[in-house]
Image (spheres, rainbow, N blue to C red):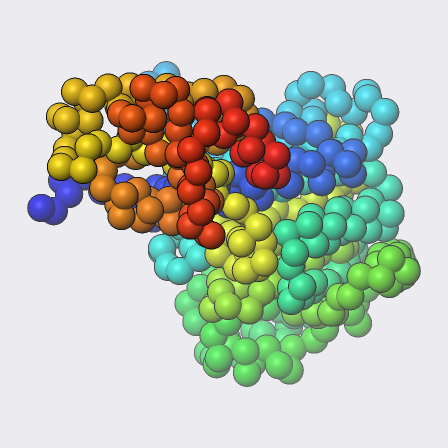
Amino acid sequence: MAARFRAPKGTRDLLPPETALWAAVEAIARETFERYGFREIRTPLLEETELFARGVGEGTDIVGKEMYSFVDKGGRNVTLRPENTASVCRAYVEHGMQQLPQPVKLFYIGPQFRYERPQKGRYRQFHQIGAELLGGFGQWADAEVLLLLVAFLRELQFTGLRVMLNTVGDESSRAAFRSALVAYLEPRKDHLGEASRRRLETNPLRILDSKDPEEQEVLSGAPHLRDHLSRASRNHFAGVCRLLESSGIEFELSPRLVRGLDYYTNTVFEIVSEGLGSQNAICGGGAYERLIEELGGKPTYAVGFAIGEDRLIEVLPESFRRGIATRCRVIVAPIGTASSHGAKSLYAEGVLDGALLVCDYFRRNGISAEWAAGKPERVFKIAEGTGARFAVFVGEEELAAGRVSLRDLETREQEQMTREEALNFLQRFLP
Ligand code: AMP
């Protein structure tokens, strides 16, 4: 029968056993981020629309066409957050965090919403794990955030990820580059798609992001930002590279990397992974020097990143996946007399009660256990599915004697003992 309701387009249910991976990744994020001095912030899913218009930028795809915006019953223009940096900066200003010792280091984990065309690795509700270092100091702040990012990905046992690094320069570098780029593209407009022609007016730097082959061709001759960098920006970027090299982090310079959001200045970066197709960026970030001022605070240097958790989970190394052992270690099974394994007779024989109580006894004592009724073959099958190593059988005869049968599903050895002895054994054997 076809389901009557489905999750809305572009959204999805995260189901077990996959959710165990999500929880494990998030636990490692919390542990690592806190070790690096970042503390958690949780901002509303909903903000004033104006916050994103200002914070993300009118010329961006996000604000231009991807926001879930609506007017609420009180006539306010609100938007489901499409990213979290603007909210974090708003909170930083709203709660006077500029008065605290600087830098303020925050991280977040949660859903974001963008009305995009769904495809592999791209959803309308997706999840980000991100960090922001606010009130930091130039290249050292950038490097610290990158060190945290790489440390986290190493904890997840990634080896083949590529760190792509670029600088988009400070305000003066960008102004100079923007004019040079527009001067180059203007006479070649006919080779640009409609979106890029529009960006020529609104946000010409974004055209460099294009994946369209014909536009790529045109762009191959375009001026380079690196030729328009101010001395301060050059020094800043050289400093970041030097710090990363000194800590043994490999990265690639990626002169075409500009990132979609308006607010970045100087250092920008992405982490890309094979195996994700065209949506191959699992993380993006960079420094932003104007955003907090734009939102009403004092000028504040800040830098941060957002990891796309959906994509991260998709490419998690096999070694990490395997390590997330299923939690159930023991299957407790009531067994009936040989003639019947049906629920009715199990109930009549009191073994259902017995199994549940034995199961609870293990659980109370720290052993994760599950119980399943049915023929032994079925019990073995369930055990296999949950990764349980042991089965504990509870039959009428065992119950009468206050005993259970403990079976090692790997060696197939089986032995009768009291439930206390079984617990003792399991506690010693299971890590
Ligand atoms: P951004 O906020 O655009 O810099 O994105 C940061 C990261 O979030 C990207 O590198 C992606 O991994 C992830 N991301 C962005 N948009 C989506 C989406 N629609 N679906 C899934 N992941 C996304």
Instruction: Work out whether 427 lies above or below 193.
Output: above
The quarter of the picture where residue 290 lies is top right
Residue depicted at 65% across the width and 56% down the height: 157
- Does the image show residue 224? yes
Residue depicted at 48% across the width and 56% down the height: 314
* 149 lies left or right of 334: right
How many marks are shown on the rendered structure? Answer: 0
The quarter of the picture where residue 338 lies is top left
Front in this rendered view, residue 360 or 404: 404
* 15 lies left or right of 168: left
Residue depicted at 61% across the width and 46% down the height: 306
Q: Position of residue 231 (x, y in %)?
A: 90, 61
- Does the image show residue 134? no
Q: Position of residue 49 (x, y in %)?
A: 48, 32
Q: Position of residue 235 (x, y in %)?
A: 90, 59
The C terminus sits in image quarter:
top right
Front in this rendered view, residue 393 or 263: 393
Instruction: Work out whether 186 lies above or below 121.
Output: below
The quarter of the picture where residue 102 lies is top right
Front in this rendered view, residue 230 or 426: 426
Residue depicted at 69% across the width and 26% down the height: 92
Q: Position of residue 109 (x, y in %)?
A: 57, 36
* 134 lies left or right of 2: right
